[in-house]
Amino acid sequence: MIANPWLRHGLWLGAAVYLALALGTMDVNWGRVAEGFPRGRDFVASFFPPDFTSRWDSILEGILESLWMTVISTVAGIVLSVPVGLGAARNLSIKPVYYACRAILAVSRTFPEIILAIFCVKLFGFGPFAGFLALSIATIGFYGKLLAEDIEDMDPVQAEAIKATGAGWFQWLNYAVQPQVMPRMIGLGLYRFDINFRESAVVGIVGGGGIGATLLTAFDRYEYSSAAAILLVIIFIVMAVEYTSGYIRRWVQ
Amino acid sequence: MSVVTKGDVPVWRRRTTPEQYFIWLAWLVGTAITVYCWKLISDKTLWIFVEDAPRQAADMASRMSPPAWSYMSKLWIPLWDTLNIATLGTAISIVLAVPVAFCAARNTTPSVLFVRPVALFIIVSSRSINSLLWALMLVTILGPGVFAGVVAIGLRSIGFVAKLLYEAIEEIDASQVEAVTATGASGAQVLTYGIVPQVLPAFAGISVFRWDINIRESTVLGLVGAGGIGLQLDASINTLAWTQVSMILLAILATVIVSEWVSAKIRHAII
């Protein structure tokens, strides 16, 4: 794939040197790892059988809270990301707005949901509101960037045709831009719903509410069979959401 | 497209009346669900804390600035660890994901009935459990440190890499495979000469893409004890050393931007 032999062998050599350095500095305590294996076996064994019944009320409450959080943060994130995404599309906006919106997107995309959640919890207190805000901010970064890229890739001929009819800016947006990006954006919105549900399981670890809080409590109390039940419920819901969103996406497109 | 007659004049409309009603209904249901969810969340919120937030934010901003630039000298080693967690974790996941992907793709799986569902289950469970949750479990088994982070990233990425790879395998051009088969090639030879060359660019692209995501994820694994710069972040937050926190956040920001740039360059070169 790489024509220049010097570069090719150089890359292999570089990779080998890096691997040696990385493994050298990793400092694995193999004694601790070996010791961990029987413990790991016990740990995995203590997950079975998953115990759905004894903590079912908290599990249900956590899952429902996660679902509300997912719905609200997806909706709010998408609504807020539309203006930012429009501003960040090079063919739509003027230079200062473009750079400002790109900066917003870059910052909100860089930090993982959990860091956003830490700060939201510090500012807004414990509970699902903090988790909702963290997920919304992450959604803005994700959805706004993809929206902007989609608008930049749109067919300029249609946009020009609408402009030629003397349409105003909003009419132009509504009749030229929106129909072109809509099918893909609906699909991406559903995809983001998926991601937000998955992430809502983590924001709870730092106090952002949802099923993550229930899961952390189960871990902290060493109730691993309840934890296993929670993980299975998460996997099941993720599968269900993924299947449904795939179905809706095919139906929309 | 449909036409409605208003008085005597036919008026063109984009949708038929039932379609129009259905869309209205969908909007109504969507709005109702959103409003209901909002109410449930808002019931659980202590609004007095939310009202206080602007003051808190200003307070925190003043505590966080200026960043403790001198602290950067202590961050190089954690950053190196973070890079290693992402890179080695991606390497592990690639090695493990390739067989899973070949078992999951409809056209290469040994058995659609038995092997494929197992492979798909591996993919879904790896994908639906966040790397932080994997790390939480692995720290218990392997002890805190970089190694747990590497394994957590590895396990989390299997599903992602395998999913995209098996979709790429399912989309390959069947005629090339047929041509290689027609020469009398064995199963392994068909794989090497008929399938692998077709998915190799996609595979390289997926790996680099995942590496980029993993850099971002490995910055926070330290929050649960799995090594990397997250350990410093956790320590600084717990000791309320906010100037250090802002320094760490800047370091993370820079790392992520650099990794994104590198991965965009590499993918551009490959595809």
Image (spheres, coloured by chain):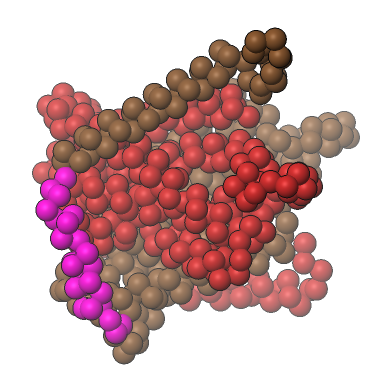
Chain colours: A red, B brown
Quarter of the picture holding the N terminus of chain B: top right
Whether residue A174 is situated above or below residue B57 in the rendered picture:
above
Residue B164 in percent (x, y) is at 59, 43
- Residue at left offset 68%, top offset 43%: A176
Whether residue B268 is situated above or below residue B63 in the rendered picture:
above
Whether residue B118 is in magenta: the answer is no
Q: Nearer the viewer, residue B217 or B85?
A: B217
Farthest residue, direction front: B7
Farthest residue, direction bottom: B70
- Residue at left offset 21%, top offset 78%: B63
Residue B49 in percent (x, y) is at 14, 55
Q: Nearer the viewer, residue A18 or A208?
A: A208
Most frequent secondary structure within the magenta stretch: helix
**A11 displayed left or right of A49:** right
Q: Which residues are magenta?
A: B45-67
Is any part of residue A198 visible from this angle?
Answer: no
- Residue at left offset 48%, top offset 22%: B24
Residue B206 in percent (x, y) is at 60, 52
Is any part of residue A190 visible from this angle?
Answer: yes
Quadrant position of residue A30: bottom left
**B207 displayed left or right of A197:** right
Whether residue B56 is in magenta: the answer is yes
Quarter of the picture holding the C terminus of chain B: bottom right
Residue A182 in percent (x, y) is at 60, 38
Q: How many marks?
A: 0
Whether residue A161 is situated above or below residue A233 in the rendered picture:
below
Whether residue B66 is situated above or below residue A77 in the rendered picture:
below
**B252 displayed left or right of B199:** left
Quadrant position of residue B55: bottom left
- Residue at left offset 11%, top offset 44%: A221
Quadrant position of residue B146: bottom left
